[in-house]
Image: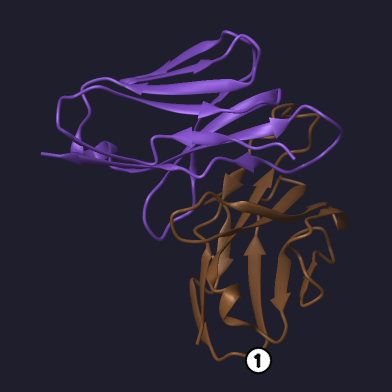
Amino acid sequence: DTGVSQDPRHKITKRGQNVTFRCDPISEHNRLYWYRQTLGQGPEFLTYFQNEAQLEKSRLLSDRFSAERPKGSFSTLEIQRTEQGDSAMYLCASSPSLGRSSYNEQFFGPGTRLTVL
Amino acid sequence: TQLLEQSPQFLSIQEGENLTVYCNSSSVFSSLQWYRQEPGEGPVLLVTVVTGGEVKKLKRLTFQFGDARKDSSLHITAAQPGDTGLYLCAGVPNSGNTGKLIFGQGTTLQVKP
C-alpha cells in the first residue's frame, strides 16, 4: 500500500465557487480524518469518520462544509460558496481502529492546497 | 479547550549544533506524537510517547514525555541540513472518546550547512 492519497494536490478557484476534494485512506484503516492547516500553523481538526459514520465535527466546520464517506472507504470534502478565508492546506489522515492502535496514530496524505481568489 | 504550546516557533542553527523543541500544555494527554512536515507535504509521524517519563530515541533525535503527561520535548543532536523542516507535536486528549489530535503551532527548523 502506498499510503494516504489526496486529489487534487492543488486547486485554485474563484470566490463563490464550490470545490470538492477526495481522500483515499490506507486500505486497512477504518478511521479517516480531515484537518485544515494555514501557513505557519499546525493542523486544525475538522471531522472524522469511523467506517461510514461521521462521529465528530469541529465548530470550524461551518454549514458550507460537508464531508462524506459513503462506503467506508474514500471520503470527499466539499466546500460550497468558497470564501478567501477558506484558502488553506486540507489534510486527510487515516488510522486503524482503536483496538489495533490505542494511541490514535494518524498517517497523513500530501494534502490539497486550496487558493480562493 | 486543550492547547499545546510549542517553543520556539522558529530556529535557525548551524550544522552540528544541538537543539531542543518544547511542547507544553496545562492539560493531560493520553499520548503524544511528534511529526515532521516538509513544505507542500503532509506531516510524517516520527514517534509516539505514551507513558509519563518515557524517553524514546530515533537516531539523533530524543523524545521525552513529561511525568505528568502534560509536556514533551524533542532534542536533536548534531543537527544536519536534512533535519530542516516543520516539527509538530500532537496530543490525544485524555478526556472522552475523541478521534482528533490537538496540534501545536509547530517549530520551523532551518539547519545551515
The chain holding disc 1 is A
The image's colouring method is by chain
Q: Secondary structure at mark 1?
A: loop
Q: Residue A83, percent across and down?
A: 62, 82
Q: Residue B2, percent across and down?
A: 71, 36
The quarter of the picture where residue A35 lies is bottom right
Q: Is residue A58 above or below residue B90?
A: below
Q: Which chain is assigned purple?
A: B
- Furthest residue in direction left, as rendered: B113
Query: In this view of the protein, which residue sits in the foreground, B89 or A59?
Result: A59
The quarter of the picture where residue A105 lies is top right
Q: Is residue B31 above or below residue A10?
A: above
The structure residue drawn at horizontal position 64% and vertical position 64%, both measured from the top left corner, is: A23
Q: Residue A102, percent across and down?
A: 74, 26
The structure residue drawn at horizontal position 79% and vertical position 59%, both measured from the top left corner, is: A59
Q: Colour of chain A?
A: brown
Residue A97 is left or right of residue A34, and the answer is right
The structure residue drawn at horizontal position 82% and vertical position 74%, both measured from the top left corner, is: A63
Amino acid type assigned to the residue bearing label 1 in the image? Gly
- Residue pointed to by mark 1: A16
